[in-house]
Image: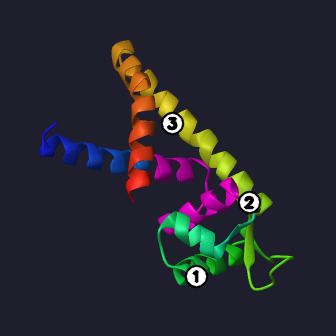
Amino acid sequence: MSSESMARLGALVGDLHRLLRRSATRRANRAELPDAQAELMLLVHAHPGVSVKEAAARMRTAPNTVSTLVRDLVAAGLVLRERDPVDGRVARLRSTEAARQRIADHHRHRVALLTDALNQLDPEARDALTAAVPHLERLAELLRESG
């Protein structure tokens, strides 16, 4: 694959992500969260009880950056920050019901958007994209490991 093709793939993946996020947020009639806040909200949802330090490591960012994101998400009612019962110096993060609902709504709208768009493609293109999903998942895994 040429470097031009690689650049196009990278740009396309980014465009698809932004288009789906913005369109799903609009369809859900919600205010859009900054990317870093959305990433942390999803991480907390996927890993209930994660600490700020653990979240920072998973996001590959500084703990003070995550602390700022946590503060904003707590203020928005999307994350709960609780003291660890064993080590009171550690804060544990959990999703609120509002965050869980927001994530479910976003997922539902994203699936609908993708379904509508894919149904406009010819069957061969749909099949090719469906067949590419496991390879894209593996690519994401490799990028996570190398990051």
Q: Nearer the viewer, mark 1 or mark 2?
A: 2
> Circle 1 is placed at which residue position?
68
Q: Earlier in the sequence, mark 1 or mark 2?
A: 2
Q: Secondary structure at mark 3?
A: helix
> Circle 3 is placed at which residue position?
113
Q: Residues within 10 Å of mark 1 (few under 14, many from 20)?
A: few
Per the image, is 112 magenta? no
Q: Earlier in the sequence, mark 1 or mark 3?
A: 1
Q: Give the amino acid type for the residue marked by disc 3 in the picture.
A: Leu
Q: Pick whichever, 117 or 52, lies toward us.
A: 52
Q: Is residue 6 left or right of residue 16?
A: left
Residue 34 visible in the current orientation: no
Position above or below: 120 against 67 = above
Q: Quadrant of residue 97?
A: bottom right
Q: Position of residue 118 (x, y in %)?
A: 43, 26
Position above or below: 132 against 58 = above
Q: Residue at x 17, y 36 (%)?
A: 1
Q: Give the amino acid type for the residue marked by disc 1 in the picture.
A: Thr
Position above or below: 65 against 130 = below
Q: Pick whichever, 37 or 48, lies toward us.
A: 48
Q: How many marks?
A: 3
The segment highlighted magenta reads 20-48
Q: Residue at x 56, y 62 (%)?
A: 38
Q: CA distance from mark 1 to mark 3?
A: 32 Å
Q: Is residue 62 left or right of residue 146?
A: right
Q: Residue at x 69, y 57 (%)?
A: 47
Q: Position of residue 23 (x, y in %)?
A: 49, 48
Q: Secondary structure at mark 1?
A: helix
